[in-house]
């Protein structure tokens, strides 16, 4: 075992603060990584503030990290000390169930091991995430990072990237399709980039008029203010697919009305409260309402390689770790352009 430093919340109401803890020394198939950058996902905020229930404290959040490999176990073949590597939302799964065998570790029937807030199979207690100096992960759950992209902008791909790429591929988004993205935050701005790169006609739905110009720069063909009923009505029955990334309660039926016959609205945002869906919104045009969770490890690697080929990374604002509570507040106000990423060097000076 070795000593790590991180930033942890000790309750749903407490700010994050410096916290020392132990990680395991790398076993035969483990990779030890010094974390360089970690993205700030809205899920970190939901989890730290216990908005979904079940948060285990102290909670060290963070599941979008890139770093430098500092040691590997003797059976590791994919990585060597000095390599750049990435870790996302999960660090293990049962590897035996039908979903794991099919490459859908995120849907593991026994429950995957999340990067933080899951039982720690090695040390007991619970797992601690990427707002920390180091992490130790089995190589099967460590990603290779392309060398042509800015590293800080790559970190958010490990959650925001794969969570939007996976459903866009699953619902075969491509040329000739009209695709909606709801919300221009961390997930939403990646969805706009991916849907554009896949060749779709992309419409962004936003509550923030001030983001319209950025949305077009990121790849949106049109921008619609979701609070403007007349603007919404112009798009009735016209979308093949809509990806909803919104983190809070909002009107899903108003979005369903915009799908054409057999269109699908897929929810990736996880508002704390259940939201009403009217049967009529679905039945009228045989529409589907679906959900999607991150992506499997192989698909995450595919997404990273797609990003390398298309020059795609996240648009970020780099912060020091002592600014993370403020970043949470700004994220709640939709004041994020478009992902906060923590420069982990700052952990060395933080108190
Ligand atoms: P984020 O950066 O805070 O972006 C969310 C965006 O939603 C905001 O920027 C805002 O965009 C819009 N929004 C916020 N409140 C709204 C409201 N009341 N009504 C309408 N729109 C609103 O968050 P994120 O990191 O992208 O995460 C988004 C959600 O996805 C979170 O719930 C997170 O937990 C979840 N998530 C799910 C998965 C998964 O596997 N399914 C993975 C990661 C994250 P505008 O300003 O453009 O309106
Ligand atoms: Zn996330
Ligand atoms: Zn499994």
Image: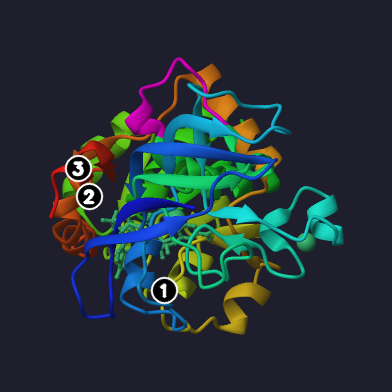
Q: Residue at x 41, y 44 (%)?
A: 134
Is 203 left, or right, of 179 in this rendering? left
- Residue 349: horizontal and vertical position, in percent? 13, 44
Instruction: List the residue tagged with mark 1.
Output: 271
Q: In the rendered structure, which segment of residues is drawn in magenta?
A: 144-154
Position above or below: 325 against 32: below
Q: Residues within 10 Å of mark 1 (few under 14, many from 20)?
A: some
Is residue 303 in sight in this rendering?
A: yes
Is 103 left, or right, of 301 in this rendering? right
Which sits in the foreground, 345 or 170? Answer: 345
- Residue 193: horizontal and vertical position, in percent? 44, 34
Label 3 residue SS? helix
- Residue 151: horizontal and vertical position, in percent? 37, 27
Measure how far apart labels 3 and 2 are at the Cα level: 25 Å
Q: Residue at x 37, y 76 (%)?
A: 57
Ligand 2 quadrant in view: bottom left
Label 2 residue SS? loop
Instruction: List the residue tagged with mark 3.
Output: 348
Q: Considering only order in the chain, which callout, 1 or 3, is on the residue closer to the N terminus? A: 1
Which sits in the foreground, 287 or 35? Answer: 35
- Mark 2 lies within 8 Å of ligand 1 (Cβ measured): yes
Q: Residue at x 55, y 83 (%)?
A: 278
Please check the rendered image and state whether residue 83 is part of the magenta-colored stretch, yes or no: no
Instruction: List the residue tagged with mark 2.
Output: 336
- Mark 1 lies within 8 Å of ligand 1 (Cβ measured): yes
Please check the rendered image and state whether residue 149 is part of the magenta-colored stretch, yes or no: yes
Q: Residue at x 61, y 57 (%)?
A: 260
Q: Considering only order in the chain, which callout, 1 or 2, is on the residue closer to the N terminus? A: 1
């Amino acid at each position: 075992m070795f000593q790590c430093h991180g930033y942890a919340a000790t309750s749903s109401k407490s700010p994050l603060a410096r916290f020392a803890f132990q990680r395991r020394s790398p076993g035969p198939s483990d990779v030890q990584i010094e974390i360089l950058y970690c993205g700030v996902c809205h899920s970190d905020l939901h989890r730290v503030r216990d908005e979904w229930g079940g948060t285990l404290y102290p909670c060290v959040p963070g599941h979008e990290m890139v770093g430098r490999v500092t040691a590997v176990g003797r059976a590791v073949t994919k990585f060597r000390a000095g390599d750049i590597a990435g870790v996302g939302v999960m660090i293990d799964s049962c590897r035996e169930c039908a979903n794991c065998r099919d490459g859908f570790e995120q849907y593991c029937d026994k429950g995957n091991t999340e990067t933080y807030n899951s039982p720690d199979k090695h040390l007991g207690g619970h797992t601690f995430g990427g707002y920390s100096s180091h992490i130790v992960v089995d190589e099967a759950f460590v990603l290779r990072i392309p060398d042509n992209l800015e590293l800080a902008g790559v970190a958010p791909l490990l959650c925001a990237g794969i969570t939007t790429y996976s459903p866009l591929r699953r619902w075969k988004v491509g040329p000739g399709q009209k695709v909606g993205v709801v919300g221009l935050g961390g997930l939403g701005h990646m969805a706009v980039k991916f849907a554009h790169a896949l060749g779709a006609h992309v419409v962004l739905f936003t509550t923030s008029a001030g983001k319209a110009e950025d949305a077009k720069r990121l790849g949106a063909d049109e921008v619609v203010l979701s609070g403007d009923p007349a603007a919404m009505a112009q798009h009735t029955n016209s979308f093949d697919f809509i990806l909803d990334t919104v983190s809070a309660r909002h009107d899903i039926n108003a979005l369903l009305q915009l799908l054409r016959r057999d269109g699908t609205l897929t929810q990736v945002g996880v508002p704390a409260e259940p939201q009403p869906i009217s049967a009529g919104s679905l039945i009228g045009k045989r529409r589907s309402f679906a959900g999607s969770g991150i992506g499997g490890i192989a698909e995450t690697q595919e997404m990273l390689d797609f990003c390398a080929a298309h020059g795609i990374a996240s648009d970020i604002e780099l912060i020091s770790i002592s600014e993370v509570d403020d970043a949470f507040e700004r994220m709640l106000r939709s004041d994020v352009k478009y992902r906060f990423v923590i420069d982990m060097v700052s952990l060395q000076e933080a108190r």
